[in-house]
Image (spheres, rainbow, N blue to C red):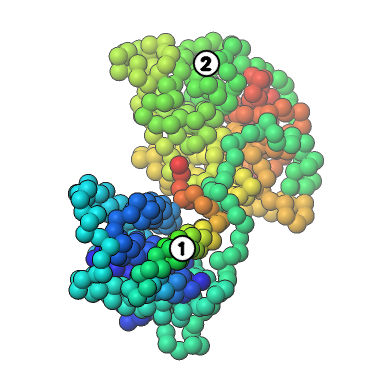
Amino acid sequence: MIILIGVPGVAAWLGVVQGESPCILCWAQRTSMVLIALVGLFILRYGPRPRYIGLAVLLGTWGVFMGLRHSALHLARDVGQGFAAPIFGVHTYVWAWVVHWISLAVIGALLLLLRDTSAENWGRAPGPAGRFAMGLFMLVVGANAFQALVSTGPPPFIGQADPVRFALNPRRWVWSLEELRGRISLRGSWTIPEPDPAAADPDPAHGPLVDLPALPVVSWERVGTSLDGRLSDLARDPVSGRFLAVTERYGVYLLDSAASGVLHHVVLDHGFSIDLSPLAGAAFVGSDTLAVVSTNKSYVLLRPDPQADADLMWRRFSETDGAVTELRRSRFATVRARQMYVMSLAYDPTADELITVALPSPRHRRLVVSRFARSDFLLASEFEPRLGAGLTLGGEGRSLAEYVVTGAVAADGLLYAISAAYSTLLVIDLRERLVRAAYAVPGLEQPTGLAARGPQLLAAQADGRIAVLRRPTP
Amino acid sequence: MEFLNFLLILWTAWLLWRRPERERLAFGLLVVSCVLMALLFLVGTHTSFVPGVNL
C-alpha cells in the first residue's frame, strides 16, 4: 500500500513541482498502481473477498506486462539512455515492472499468512489507520487528477508519447489525440517475413533501374557432386581455386577447383549454442578459414584440420568427416539491418572485413551493406549505397531496396552482388559507398551465390548450375 | 481520458468511505476504471502490441 500510494504520490509531486509529465504508457502504469491500492481499500473495508484478490492479481499481471512492453522500447539502448529522468539510476518504466511484480509477491505472501478465522475481523468501519490511508489515497489521486487534466486534458483527449513539461499557463497545455494514429499491428516493425527469394520476379525488365546493359551468360558449369540440400551459396578461394558450398540444411562442403571433388564435408548442429537459421552465405577468409552465415546473421568459422578433436567437435557437427575443426560460432550484430535477414557473405581482404547485404522487407525498405571487422567480428561500418552517376530509377516509388541480394563477392575494392529479384548484378564501390554500375543478367533461375574466378564471376543457382559471367570493372 | 479515470477512482474511494452499502456500485466503478486503464495502454501501444524486441 505504501509503495502503491507512495509511487503515484511522489510521481505526482515530481510532475507538478518539477514539471515531469508522464507519457500515455506511464499514465496507465501509474493508474494501475493506484487501482491496486484501491483494491487494498476495498479489502480494508469489506474484507479479503476472492474477487478483490483476483482483481488485484490481474492488475499485477497486467502491470508486469505493461512494464515489460514499455521497457522494451528502451532496454536495448546505449548505457544511460532512456525516456525521462531515472530514479535511483533506473528509469520509471522499469520501476513500474518492479512495483507490479512486488505487488504480486506481496499479495501471495498475504494470502499465505491469511488465517481462516480472520474473516471475523473484517467488514467493520475503518479505524484511524484505515481512515488515514483513505484520506492519503484521495489526496494522491486528487493530485494525479489535477496533473492529468493539465497534461492530457478532459475527454476525449488522451495522453501523448512525448508530453511537454507541466505548466500552469494554459497556453503551454497540449491536449491531443495523436496517439490514435498509426495502423494496428501485433509486432509493428518486427513484422518481418522469412526470406523467400524464390518468390522474387526474375525479369530484369521489371527492375527499378532502367536501361541497364545486359551481361550475358558466357557458359554454364555445375557443382559436380550431389549435395544434401539446395545450394544456398558458393565461394571460391582465389589462391587455391577451391570452392566452398553451403546448403540450406546446414551442409558445408569444401570442394576442389573443379567444384566436383569433396575435400571436406560437415553438417552443422544448428541448435548448439546459437540459433542457426538456414545457411545462406559463404566466404573464404584467407585460404584456410571457411566462414558461413545463416539468414539471421549467425555465423560459423571452420578450418580443415586433420588433428580435429572428434569428442570436442561432436557437439558442433551432426555429421563430419572428422577432419574439420569449428573455430567459433556467434552472431553478427548490426544497426540499420537489425530487423533484416541476409542471404550473402563476402570477405574483403583489403579491409580485412566480412560483408553482408541485408534483404529488404515491406516494413524495412532499405538496401544495407554491413561490414564486420575480422579482428573482433563487430560492426565496423554500415551504409545504404547511393546511386552512382549514369544509373536511373524508373519512376516514383522505385528504389534500390527492391533488390534481393542472394550472393556477394568482394574484389578490387568492389562488392559484386547478385539479386534474385530482377536478375541484376549490382557493382558497389565499397570506398565511395555507391552503386557504381548494374547489369541485367538474363537467363538466371534463382541465383543463390556469387563467386569470383579471375576475370569471371560465377553465379550459382539453387539447382547447382553455375552461370559464368564476365566480371565487369566499371 | 486519464483525468476521467482518476475522477472515477475518486468517486469509488468516496463511496467506500461514505457509502459502504454501495459496494456493488463501487466495485463496478473499479472494474470500469481497470478496463479504461487497459484500453488507454492498448491505444498507446496499438502499433505494436508485443514488445518491440527480438523474441
Q: CA distance from mark 2 to mark 1?
A: 73 Å
**Tags 2 and 1 both on a single chain:** no
Q: Residue at x 49, y 49 (%)?
A: B50
Residue A451 at x, y percent in the picture: 58, 28
Q: Is residue A337 left or right of residue A439?
A: left
Q: Is residue A422 left or right of residue A33?
A: right
Count of marks, rendered view: 2
Residue A148 at x, y percent in the picture: 44, 76
Residue type (three-letter) at the residue carrying disc 1: Gly
Asked if residue A272 shows in the view, the reply is yes
Residue A384 at x, y percent in the picture: 57, 51
**In the rendered image, the vertical position of residue A352 relative to residue A44, given as above or below:** above
Label 1 marks a residue whose chain is: B
**In the rendered image, the vertical position of residue B55 relative to residue A383, given as above or below:** above
Residue type (three-letter) at the residue carrying disc 2: Leu
Q: Quadrant of residue A415?
A: top right
Which residue in the structure is indicated by mark 1?
Answer: B28
Q: Quadrant of residue A457?
A: top right
Label 2 marks a residue whose chain is: A
Asked if residue A92 shows in the view, the reply is no
